[in-house]
Image (spheres, rainbow, N blue to C red):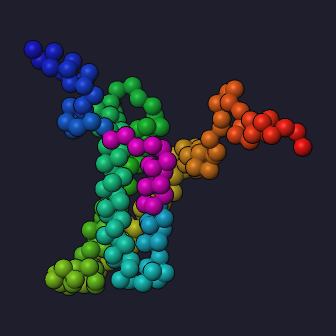
Amino acid sequence: MCETFSAHVRASGVNPILWRKPMRLSARWKFLIDLTFFVGFLLLMQPAFTGLSLHEWFSVALVAVMALHLLIQWDWIVQVTLRFFHKFWHKSRLQYVLDILLLVSMGAAFVSGFAISRHVLPFLGLHVEEDFFWRFLHSTSADLTLIIVAVHVALNWKWVVATFKSLFRRKQTRRGAQPVMQPLQQVGGER
């Protein structure tokens, strides 16, 4: 019975770990979400550019974008986790380890940032005394995150370039299809 149940689950396309169908988004949508995440992160790296209040509120928004990014990539995360010690591409292992480091460093930056918050936490009615540890952790983890993001983008550069090009590529007509103006010119005759 167990074998037939697992065969049924595999045939249904439902991920048994998540008990949901995998989220399928086009490469364009994934790219736009990742680009939003990347640009938002770069803006956060310069609080003098945005001001402290916007820096903190953008951080809250970026946590939501990060959660969306993880949700979209969840199936890849699960598959690599399950196959990490089996025969697997070295690049996928490297990306996986890098992604874990990125999650930890970015998580530390967010948590420490909220711990030293002067706008978000007071807005929520919470007050925390300023502590050197949280400030040090925030600046160190943010700098480390910037380095890891640079390596992450470099590892995925081919995908970034290909997807960026596809955003601006015109759809080509199918073979044998005539451009729209050609039949109109034939009807009207030569001029």
Name the spot of residue 127 as percent of width and height, x first.
18, 84
Give the left or right position of residue 159, taking residue 191 as reference. Answer: left
Secondary structure of the magenta portion, mostly? helix
Q: Does the magenta portion include 7?
A: no
Question: Is any part of residue 155 visible from this angle?
Answer: no
Question: Is any part of residue 29 visible from this angle?
Answer: yes
Name the spot of residue 184 as percent of width and height, x first.
75, 39
Q: Which residues are magenta?
A: 23-37
In this rendered view, identify the residue nearer to me: 148 or 183. 183
Residue at image position (32%, 63%) is 63
Name the spot of residue 16 as percent of width and height, x first.
20, 31
Quadrant hosting residue 133: bottom left
When the figure is inspected, residue 50 is found, relative to residue 183, above or below; the finding is below
Quadrant hosting residue 180: top right
Please state, as top left, top right, bottom left or bottom right, where the C terminus lies in the image: top right
Residue at image position (16%, 15%) is 4
Give the left or right position of residue 2, taking residue 37 as reference. Answer: left
When the figure is inspected, residue 26 is found, relative to residue 107, above or below; the finding is above
The total number of labels drawn is 0
Quadrant hosting residue 37: bottom left
Residue ranking furthest to the right: 191
Residue ranking furthest to the front: 188
In this rendered view, identify the residue nearer to me: 175 or 14. 175
Please state, as top left, top right, bottom left or bottom right, where the N terminus lies in the image: top left
Q: Does the magenta portion include 28?
A: yes
Residue at image position (38%, 77%) is 55
Name the spot of residue 169 as percent of width and height, x first.
63, 46
Residue at image position (28%, 84%) is 118
Residue ranking furthest to the left: 1
Give the left or right position of residue 181, taking residue 85 as reference. Answer: right
